[in-house]
Image (cartoon, rainbow, N blue to C red):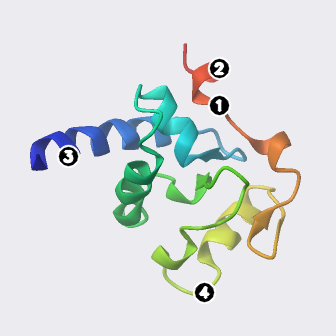
Amino acid sequence: MQSKNHNFFEKVYAVVRKIPYGRVTSYGAIAKYLGMARSARMVGWAMNNAHAMEDVPAHRVVNRKGLLTGKHHFEGTNLMQQLLENEGIKVVDDQIVDFENFFWDPMKELV
């Protein structure tokens, strides 16, 4: 089971690396793209350690409503929000403002 999870996590990281600057996606959108629509939580588990990987922009992955649910995995209190705001994404009360305008759907973008 360990290698199966590791393989899935690597697939998640590969998708996250493709999220463009200034855009965000959701755990569920990544799971759906990988053919495992019911595995949004597993994508979240993969992202728990991704914040420490410099080549994986984990701050660009949020929940389906645009909430920064993974922010506690980043160093400092507001690092995830600061990283998003540096890319021009406004965040208020841990939620992305105009989420639908910044949402990147791998099902449409990665053909």
Quadrant placement of the C terminus = top right
Q: Can residue 17 be seen in this view?
A: no
CA separation in Å, label 2 and label 3:
25 Å
Count of labels in the image = 4
| Amino acid type, mark 1 | Asp
| Amino acid type, mark 4 | Thr
Q: Is residue 60 visible?
A: yes
Q: Name the residue under label 4.
A: 77
| Amino acid type, mark 3 | His
Q: Name the residue under label 2.
A: 108
Specify few, some or many for label 3: CA neighbours under 10 Å numbering under 14, 14-19, or 20 or more: few
Give the residue displayed 73% in from the left and 40% down from the top.
Answer: 103
- CB under 8 Å between callouts 1 and 2? yes
Specify few, some or many for label 2: CA neighbours under 10 Å numbering under 14, 14-19, or 20 or more: few
Is 53 placed left or right of 64 in the picture?
Answer: left
Is 40 placed left or right of 80 in the picture?
Answer: left
Identify the mark nearer the N-term, 3 or 1: 3
Q: Is mark 4 on a helix, strand or loop?
A: loop
54 vs 16: above or below: below
Give the residue displayed 59% in from the left and 67% down from the top.
Answer: 69
Identify the mark nearer the N-term, 4 or 2: 4
Q: Which mark is residue 6?
A: 3
CA separation in Å, label 1 and label 2:
6 Å
Q: Is mark 1 on a helix, strand or loop?
A: loop
Residue 39 on image: x %, y %: 41, 43
- CB under 8 Å between callouts 3 and 1? no
| Amino acid type, mark 2 | Lys
Give the residue displayed 60% in from the left and 53% down from the top.
Answer: 60
